[in-house]
Amino acid sequence: MTTKTVLRAARRTFVAGAAALLVGSLAVPSFVTPTIAADGPASVADLAQGLLGAVVNISTSQTVKGSEGPGAVPMPQLPEGSPFQDFFDDFFKNRGGDKDGGAQKVQSLGSGFVIDAEQGIVVTNNHVIADADDIEVNFSDGVTLKATLVGTDTKTDVAVLKVDPKGHKLTAVKFGDSTKMRVGDWVMAIGNPFGLGGTVTVGIVSARNRDINSGPYDDFIQTDAAINRGNSGGPLFNSVGEVIGINTAIISPSGGSIGIGFSIPAQLASGVVDQLRQFGETRRGWLGVRIQPVTDDIAESLGMATAKGALVAGVIKGGPVDNGTILAGDVIIKFDGKDINEMRDLPRVVAESPVGKAVDVIIVRKGVEQTVKVTLGRLEDGEKLASGEDGNTDPGSGDDKAPAVSTASVLGMTIGELNDETRTKFGIAADVTGVVITDVTKDSAAAERGIQPGEVITEIAQESVATPKDVMDRIGALKEQGRKNALLMLASKTGELRFVTIRMD
C-alpha cells in the first residue's frame, strides 16, 4: 500500500468519524421532542379535506372611470390636425385614458367561508368587497354563484354575504371559542393567496391581543401560518376544524408572508356576524365617555397603586352617563365583571355589550373605588350625537369669590383670570370655566407636556378651580401631601377636555 493510499484511507476514516459525531450532536434529546400527535397531527390531510369545501374564493369587480384605474395613462393633448392623432386615438381607445373618460372593470380576489349551508351565508373581510359592483363566490369544485351583500362593519373589517343555497350543495363550518387559544397552539389557514385557489398552510398562534392600530377594537390573533395577499377574509382553524379567526392583515415589505399574520378573533367576529345577519348593521353598546390612558404619573396623582383602567376625559352631553353617574376624572377599572387593564380594553367590552343592558361599572373616584349602575345606549346613535357637540361637561364653578390675585406663575405657566378680555383674546367659548393659561415657559414642565397658551385649567387633582389663587392653593396642598405630580384637567378653547400630569419637584 502506497503512502497516498494510506493517507486517503485515514482521511475517509476521519471524515466518517466526524460525521458520526456531528449527527450525534444534532440528535434531539427526548425531553424536547415535540408532542405533535397531541396538539397538532403529523398530517393535516384529513382535517383539510373536510374543511376545503367550506372555504371559498371571493371575486369582485368594480367599474371605474378610465382615469381612475390603476396604471391608467392620460390621453396626450395634441395640436389640432396633428398627424399622430389617429395613432393615439387607436392606442388609447378602451384603455381608460381616452378623453371621454371611458370606464373599465377592476377585479380583485379574496377569501371567505360558509357558516350557514341552509341560508347560504358567507363571511369575509369588508375590504375584500368594499365598493364592489359585482360579487361572486367561487367554490373549490369550480362552481360559481352570485352573491348579495347582507351587511358590513368597517370597524372590525367584517362583511356578510348571501348566495342561493339551492344553486350548490354547501358545506359549512362553525365559529369556535378563540378565548381558549394559547400561544403555541396549532392553527390552519385556508385561503386564496395570489389567486392560486384553495391553499392550506399550517402554523401556530404566535401571540394574542395584538393591537396594530387598524381600528377601535383591535384584539388580533397573531400567527406564523403563511398568510399572503388573497388570504384576506379566509378562516383560521383550530385543530378540531373550528374557525377561531378571520385572516385579515399581514406585516410584510414585499406582500408575501414573513410569518407575521393577523386574524380577527372569533369571539369578536361572531357577534358582529350575528348582528349583521339579524339587522343588516351593527348595534353596539355605548357608554358615552371620552377616555385616555392611565399613565404612571396619572395613577400616582390619583393615589392609585398601579396604572390601570381608562381615565374618563369627558362625558358626552345627552349620553347614557350624562346624569352624573360617571364624571370626568373617574378611572374605570371594571366593566360588567370584566377587568379594564388598559384604555383600549374598554371600547371593545362596551361595544360587545347589548344596547339597553344595565351593567355594573367599578370606578376610582378621588382615590376611592365605588360601583355605579349604567344603562348602555347605542353606539351608532351616540356617534351622531358626539359629532354634534363640543364634548365639554360642566366641571363646576368655583366659590365665586373675588380673586386675591389676577395672575400668577406656577409650574412653568403664567395663569390668569378667565374674563371677557381673556376670552376674546384667546377665542375661548362662553361655556368654558376655570383659569386661563396665558403663557408657557420654554423647556418647563408644562411645555414638556404640550400645554399651550389659551388652554384653561378646570380642575387640579379632581378639584375645581376658578381663580389663580385656587390654583396656587391646590398646588401647595398637593406638595404638603407629598405628591410629586399634579393632575390637571385642561379644556381647549372649544371646551374639549384632556388630562395631563406635571411634575412639581
Image (tube, grey):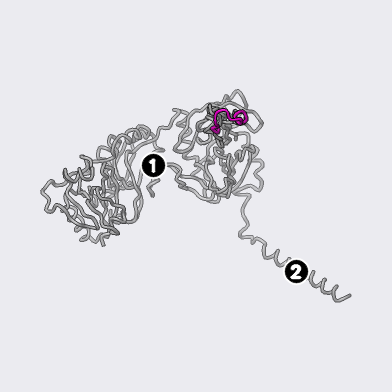
The foreground one among 427 and 269 is 427
Whole-percent x and y of residue 303?
A: 28, 55
Q: Which residue is mark 2?
A: 17
Q: Residues within 10 Å of mark 1 (few under 14, many from 20)?
A: some
In the picture, the quarter occupied by the N terminus is: bottom right
Q: Which residue is mark 1?
A: 347
Whole-percent x and y of residue 300?
A: 30, 56
Is 44 drawn above or below residue 17 in the view shown? above
Residue 185 in view here: no
Whole-percent x and y of residue 181?
A: 52, 46
What kind of element bears circle 2?
Answer: helix
Kindly identify the amino acid type of the residue bearing the numbered disc 1. Answer: Pro
Is 278 drawn above or below residue 208 in the view shown? above
Kindly identify the amino acid type of the residue bearing the numbered disc 2. Answer: Gly
The foreground one among 262 and 61 is 61
Q: Residues within 10 Å of mark 2 (few under 14, many from 20)?
A: few
Q: Is residue 306 magenta?
A: no
* Distance between the alpha carbons at the discs numbered 1 and 2: 64 Å
User: What number is the disc on residue 64?
Assistant: none
Write down the region rendered in magenta: 75-91
> What residue is shown at x 44% (from left), y 45% (from top)?
213
> What residue is shown at x 60% (from left), y 35% (from top)?
55
Task: Give left or right: position of 2 versus 147.
Answer: right
